[in-house]
Image (cartoon, rainbow, N blue to C red):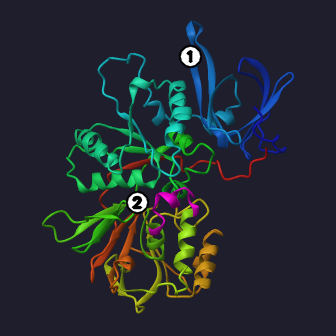
Amino acid sequence: MRMSASPKEDCGNEGTVQGTVRGKDASLTYDPVEGILSIEGHSWDETVLDRRVIGVIDGRKDGEFRTKSQQILLLSKPPGAHYKFEDVEATNLPQSFVDANVISSRFEQLVPSRSTSKGSGSVPSLYVVISIGSGTGEAQGFYDNVVEPAFTASGIQRFSYHVHTTDSNKSIAQFISAVILPRANEGVSQTILFLSGDGGIVDTINVLLSSARSGQYVKPAIGLLTMGTGNALANSTGLNRDLTRGLRHFYRGKAHPLPTLTAEFSPGSEILLDEGRKAEPVAPPAADAGEIYGAVVCSWALHASLVADSDTAEYRKFGSQRFQMAAKELLSPSDGSAPHVYRGQITLFKLDKNGHEIRQMLDAQNYGYILATLVSNLEEKLTISPHSKPLDGQLRLVRFGAISSEEVMKILGLAFQGGAHVDGEAVGYENVEGLRIDFDEADGRWRRVCVDGRIVRVGESGWVEVRKNTRMNVLDIVADLGSHVTYRQEIT
């Protein structure tokens, strides 16, 4: 199992120790700077990258002799093949390697006690949600090939957790409402591992924030394995910094509060469904306005339009490339017409030096791009808000006016270069508490707003008001924010 070239000599190496891997004697050397464990046997050798390690289980008891052994939970993906999980038995691994990869105490608490057995009557508090429609449809295969065997190797048997597989676009919301919310209101601690895109988290947030919560309410903790197309939340939180699709974070991370935002829409606004062919009101019956909640973004103009236009079965075949494909059509329409100029009045909500809210009405009436975000990256390499830090809770606004298609493409290109677009004169970039958009568009197509992938068509002469939530904290996300594992070009 050769996974990388041998590591470079580095002064950070702690030295070579003698141990065993898969029952064979071996010399083990760990380079903490490169994150590479080198294994040399009598007539064989291999290397293990931290980026492929889900976790290390240290000090397990082995049979009646109670011999200390260790497990490396490893993930690989041969070219053109499915993901493959491997449970590697070892002894005397370098301590620095163990420290860099050992599973967290939070994860250990998910492992049932030895007294728990099948049929004991205990109700699982660990759930796995498989969103079969996310992205390019990898979720079920990843669960079968990786998650289930990894759980089994970790001591989490199949009977000790519940698996929910989606069967509609309302499936996750119904599951959260029927199962998770009632138990959270009873004070039960729950953990949910999502194999989905951002949509699964958005559905969860909207159920929890729109429902009554008791005084006993205990926040569920969620893990996220990236199965979507953009995966903005995962990319911005660092869940994609390794090669385990976020499973490493679920094994090693801690629970952190997930910042959210609220978008309030004027009466007559509708959520678009089924590729825009169906719609349902945002506001409940007899309500003056309706709210949608998010954890990533609320946008209007180019961004909202390209997300809406690319949300079709045909476009989704192309993964994250669908966004660029839709953007090109919007900026250079195939009928030869000029790109649309979005019209509306924007008011920003900010805090003065005394912490009091002030309102700033922008002079411009014509826009090309308006995006308020809680995250740094909309895609793995698309850094829309370079000053954003993981889960910092700060809402930031990125905007530019009605400029030429060539200028827009240049700005978007710079966003793929570490967020260099925010340094340009044409781009506005600032911290805000929120904003309001009053629309001046006759055609409903140009009044579409995106909230974490959900598309809302605002009513004519309507408005949307977006604010970050500072008091409503209903959900935690599991992440290893202190992880040393970073992007690195793999050598094969």
User: Percent position (x, y) of residue 161?
Assistant: 39, 30
Figure quadrant of the C terminus: top right
Q: Report whether 240 appears left or right of 15.
A: left
Q: Nearer the viewer, residue 138 or 21?
A: 138
Residue 316 sits inside the magenta stretch: yes
Check disc 1 and give the amino acid type: Lys
> Where is residue 307 shown, x and y percent of the image?
46, 67
Residue found at the very far top of the displayed protein: 64
- Picture disc at residue 295: 2
Residue nearest the viewer, comparing 196 with 356 = 196
Amino acid at dot 2:
Ala
Q: Nearer the viewer, mark 2 or mark 1?
A: 2
- Does the rendering let one see residue 51? yes
Q: Where residue 92 appears, x then y in whole percent?
A: 70, 24
Per the image, label 1 sits on a secondary structure element best described as strand
Q: How far, Cα to Cα, is label 2 from label 1?
A: 42 Å
User: Which numbered tag is attached to residue 193?
Assistant: none
Compared to 341, does 77 lie above or below?
A: above
Q: Where 92 sits versus 473, above or below?
A: above
Q: Sequence order check: which comes first, mark 2 or mark 1?
A: 1
Instruction: Give the magenta-colored segment's residue range.
Output: 309-321
Q: Which residue is mark 1?
A: 61
The residue at 58%/87% (across/down) is: 425
- Report whether 433 appears left or right of 148: left
Task: Name the residue rendered at 57%, 20% in the picture.
Answer: 60
